């Protein structure tokens, strides 16, 4: 998605990607960090560039995965390098909606994955947060 803007800079000997989230400087984290051939992507909620959220869980999941993809690619990786995802949802009874989206992105890659229900996420409109780990070959 061309509306996802990622910047990369060196910090503490690592390459760090920022999405410009207001939370990054407040909490002191990066959207993604590359150290050697490992890329770790912070939990991404499905927020749109204008700060709104889609109503459906599936659309939020798709947006979260698009942000993850942009972060990984900004650090020289590809989705094919993802070895693990973790999905935190506020209503696990809708897991199939998430599974369809995750499956459409990772059907040939098949990383290890986890989906768990949480009481809430940092933003009350967010229904899902997804993390990813990648090893660049």
Image (spheres, rainbow, N blue to C red):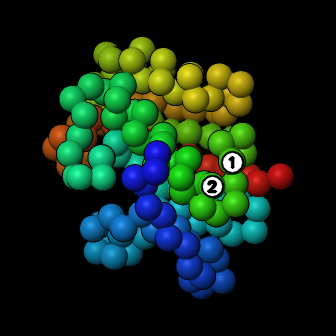
Quick one: 134 or 18, which is closer to the camera? 18
Residue 82 is drawn in which quadrant? top right
Q: Is there CB contact under 8 Å for labels 1 and 2?
A: yes
Whole-angstrom CA distance, mark 1 to mark 2, is: 6 Å
24 or 89: nearer the viewer: 24
* Residue beneath disc 2: 73
Image height check: is 52 above or below 60?
below
Q: Quadrant of residue 79?
A: top right
- Which residue occupies 62% across, 29% down? 106
Is 82 placed left or right of 48 in the picture?
right
Dot 1 corresponds to which residue?
A: 78
Q: Which residue appears at 68% of the width and 28% of the height?
A: 110
Find residue 97 and report its horizontal and vertical position in percent: 39, 18
Q: Outermost residue, right direction?
A: 137
Residue 60, compared with residue 43, is above or below; it is: above
Most extreme residue toward the left, as rendered?
124
């Amino acid at each position: 998605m061309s509306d996802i803007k990622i910047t990369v800079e060196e910090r503490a000997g690592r390459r760090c990607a920022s999405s410009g989230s207001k939370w990054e400087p407040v909490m002191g984290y990066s959207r993604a960090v590359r150290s050697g051939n490992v890329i770790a992507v912070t939990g991404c909620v499905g927020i749109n560039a204008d700060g709104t959220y889609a109503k459906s869980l599936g659309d939020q999941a798709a947006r979260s995965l698009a942000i993850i993809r942009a972060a990984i690619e900004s650090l020289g990786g590809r989705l094919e390098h993802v070895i693990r995802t973790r999905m935190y949802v506020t209503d696990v009874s809708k897991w199939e909606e998430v599974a369809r989206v995750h499956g459409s992105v990772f059907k040939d890659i098949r990383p290890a994955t986890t989906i768990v229900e949480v009481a809430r996420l940092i933003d009350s409109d967010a229904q899902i947060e997804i993390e990813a780990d990648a090893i660049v070959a």
